[in-house]
Amino acid sequence: MSRKPISKSQRYDILKRDNFTCQYCGRSAPEVRLEVDHVMPVSKGGNNSNDNLKVACRYCNGGKSNKVSGGTDVGQQIDALCRHFYVILHDNGIVLTRDFSDDICIDLFIYMDVDAVEIIKIANQSKSMTHFFKQVLHYYSEQLQDGE
């Protein structure tokens, strides 16, 4: 199916309906660039009806590719976080497979209990995986010391 453009008025209506907020991660402009996302991708038969569109930030929408999007349960929030993490690392020249990036993100977020905002902040400031891991370990050790 070929992609039919979304009109400017429809795009505005969707942004307004979704309160100018990414429906995956909850971030809003001007913190992030917002886009209108197809819940059911056009490549899988989706259309431009309002019920098939929702607001997504550039990071979440870019990482979603042509996957069908869902709601906002914890698993989907973790998936959105991992998409952010992957895109930010890639934007900073740190190229990983998506699976490896997801594994790292989930390990940090779930098992080490690193705050999601901190993962994104550290990833945003990192220019290499070595630098990223040093910063995460520094953050983690500070958290451990604060907890004692």
Image: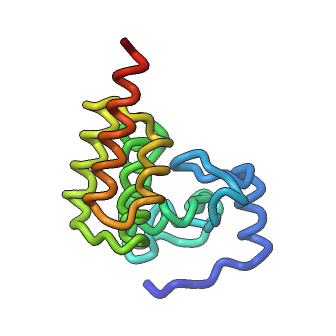
Q: Which residue lies at the image location 24% right of the left edge and 40% below the top edge? A: 107
| Colouring scheme applied when the structure was drawn | rainbow
Name, please, the residue furthest toward the top: 148
Q: Nearer the viewer, residue 2 or 19?
A: 19
User: Where is residue 94, by image quadrant?
Assistant: bottom left
Q: Percent from the top left, x then y, of residue 28?
A: 67, 53
Q: Percent from the top left, x then y, of residue 72?
A: 49, 40
Q: Which residue lies at the image location 44% right of the left edge and 35% below the top edge? A: 115
Q: Which quadrant: the N terminus?
A: bottom left
User: Where is residue 88, by image quadrant?
Assistant: bottom left
Q: In the image, 14: left or right of 133?
A: right
User: Where is residue 108, by image quadrant?
Assistant: top left
Q: Percent from the top left, x then y, of residue 34?
A: 64, 64
Q: Percent from the top left, x then y, of residue 97?
A: 21, 66
Q: Nearer the viewer, residue 97 or 45?
A: 97
Q: Which residue lies at the image location 44% right of the left edge and 42% below the top edge? A: 77
Residue 127 vs 69, above or below: the answer is below
Q: Which residue lies at the image location 45% right of the left edge and 63% below the top edge? A: 40
Q: How many marks?
A: 0
Name, please, the residue furthest toward the bottom: 2
Q: In the image, 56: left or right of 130?
A: right
Q: Which quadrant: the C terminus?
A: top left
Q: Nearer the viewer, residue 106 or 94?
A: 94
